[in-house]
Image: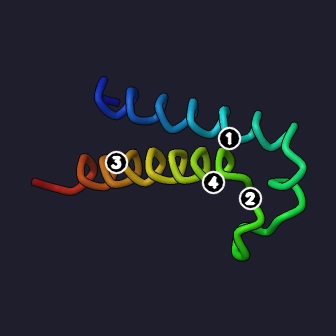
Amino acid sequence: MSTGLAELDARAAEAYAAYVSHLHGCHPCQDGDGSEGDDCPTGTRLRDAWKTARNTSLRARRTHAAPA
């Protein structure tokens, strides 16, 4: 695995860890389903950051795996 992919994977893992850590202590985020805007602003920001990091990592992996 290239260093760039490993770095993107690490960023996605860190973002996910921050989001899950927040969920453990935030009742609005625990109770809401996210589709109705029940999450707190911090939870929304952390979830969006995790999704962006995850999708960036997945896109890079697909690009790296594609034949030249």
Give the residue displayed 80% in from the left and 44% down from the top: 23
Dot 1 or dot 2: first in sequence order is: 1
Q: Which residue is mark 2?
A: 39
**Label 1 residue SS:** helix
Residue 37, horizontal then vertical, whole percent: 70, 69
In primary-sequence order, the first of circles 1 and 3 is 1
| Residue marked by disc 3 | 61
**Number of other residues with Cα within 10 Å of mark 1, as a class: few under 14, some 14 to 19, many 20 or more:** many
From the top left corner, tell me how far across and down residue 55 is, in percent: 43, 54
Of callouts 3 and 2, the N-terminal one: 2
| Kind of residue sitting beneath label 1 | Tyr
Q: Residues within 10 Å of mark 4 (few under 14, many from 20)?
A: some
Q: What separation in Å lies between label 3 and label 4 (alpha carbons)?
A: 26 Å
Give the spatial CA distance, label 1 vs label 3.
23 Å
Q: Residue at x 84, y 44 (%)?
A: 26
- Residue type (three-letter) at the residue carrying disc 4: Thr
* Badge 2 element: loop
Disc number placed over residue 19 in the picture, else none: 1
Q: Which mark is residue 44?
A: 4
Is label 4 in a helix, a strand or a loop? helix
Task: Give me the residue at 73% from left, 76% from top.
Answer: 36
Q: Nearer the viewer, mark 3 or mark 4?
A: 4
The mark that comes first in sequence, 4 or 2, is 2
CB-based contact (under 8 Å), mark 4 and mark 2: yes
**What's under tag 2, amino acid-wise?**
Asp
What amino acid does circle 3 point to?
Arg
Quadrant of the rendered structure where residue 14 is?
top right
Q: Nearer the viewer, mark 1 or mark 3?
A: 1
29 on left or right of 37: right
Q: Nearer the viewer, mark 3 or mark 2?
A: 2
